Image (cartoon, rainbow, N blue to C red):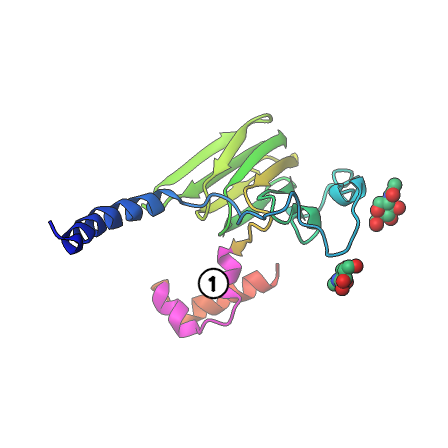
Amino acid sequence: MTLNSIIYILFHLLVPALDTFSNTLAVAGDPDIIYDFASPQNYSVNGSFFTYTDLRGVLDQIPLSFKATKVTLVEFPALNGQSISYAIFQYPGGSINPPHIHPRAAELLFLVSGSLQVGFVDTKRTLYTQNLKPGDVFIFPKGLIHYQYNPQSVSATAISAFGSANAGTVSIPLSIFSTGIDDVILAKAFKTDTYTVKKIRSGLNKS
Ligand SMILES: *[C@@H]1O[C@H](CO)[C@@H](O)[C@H](O)[C@H]1NC(C)=O
Ligand SMILES: *[C@@H]1O[C@H](CO)[C@@H](O)[C@H](O)[C@H]1NC(C)=O
């Protein structure tokens, strides 16, 4: 066997193997940093850098409409590179967190009080829905459309953890109807007319 044919055989054995290997390396979190933590350059940190205090009193007031208070790397720079973040949700009676996507993270929701009807839709367009009781934990897989609804008249409170310091939010209604996509395109996409598209747009503008 010549050296060339050995290289040829090795190459054809290795390439599929490497391909399989790289396919199994699906990244579940943010890119790793090569430091213990990411602090601003030439900034000497102490315990305060790792402490976020702006959630103090966050649950003292019940808002009039659905409210999300986020703790991402934007609000809390120490999260940078740690693949984790939080959001505190308050749902007055009858309110919803409309269908949306977090492109960079799964979401783990813990219902503190009240009740929530939650759901997500997978890529086969199967809806998974559940009525949560206080103490229940629900996982919304990464990148899938999901929502929460408080069907009761008493308010509900939930806390979510995200597997990214910057999970990102794509609101389905706002991304589609409030970004200037042409009425004709939306009318065709939703198999309706431009009058209906305009009506949806103006409804969303009223917030
Ligand atoms: C950081 O500190 C080093 C050493 O004191 C200095 O040479 C460098 O210019 C500083 N960088 C910045 C961005 O301040
Ligand atoms: C910790 O760092 C902050 C910000 O640099 C500073 O204001 C604070 O005084 C420091 N605390 C201690 C105990 O050194």
Horizontally, residue 177 falls left or right of residue 205, namely left
Query: Residue 175: in sight, yes or no?
Result: yes
- Nearer the observer, 87 or 48: 48
Query: Residue 193: in sight, yes or no?
Result: no
Q: Is residue 144 above or below residue 139?
A: below
The count of marks equals 1
Secondary structure at numbered mark 1: helix
- Where is residue 151 drawn, in percent x and y? 55, 37
Q: Which residues are magenta?
A: 171-189
Which amino acid lies under the numbered mark 1 shown in the image of this protein?
Ile
- Nearer the observer, 48 or 184: 48
Local packing at callout 1 (Cα closer than 10 Å; few below 14, some 14-19, many 20+) is: few
Q: Residue furthest left?
A: 1
- Where is residue 163 drawn, in percent x and y? 54, 42
Provide the major secondary structure of the magenta segment.
Answer: helix
Q: Is residue 182 above or below residue 173?
A: below
Q: Which residue is mark 1?
A: 176
* In the image, residue 102 lies in the stretch drawn in magenta: no
Horizontally, residue 200 falls left or right of residue 36, namely left
Residue visible at 53% across and 66% down in the picture: 178
Horizontally, residue 89 falls left or right of residue 186, namely right
- Nearer the observer, 170 or 150: 170
**Which quarter of the figure has residue 46?**
top right
- Where is residue 190 drawn, in percent x and y? 37, 62
- Where is residue 83 drawn, in percent x and y? 57, 44
Q: Quadrant of the C terminus?
A: bottom right
Horizontally, residue 145 falls left or right of residue 60, namely left
Residue visible at 79% across and 40% down in the picture: 47
Q: Residue furthest front?
A: 2
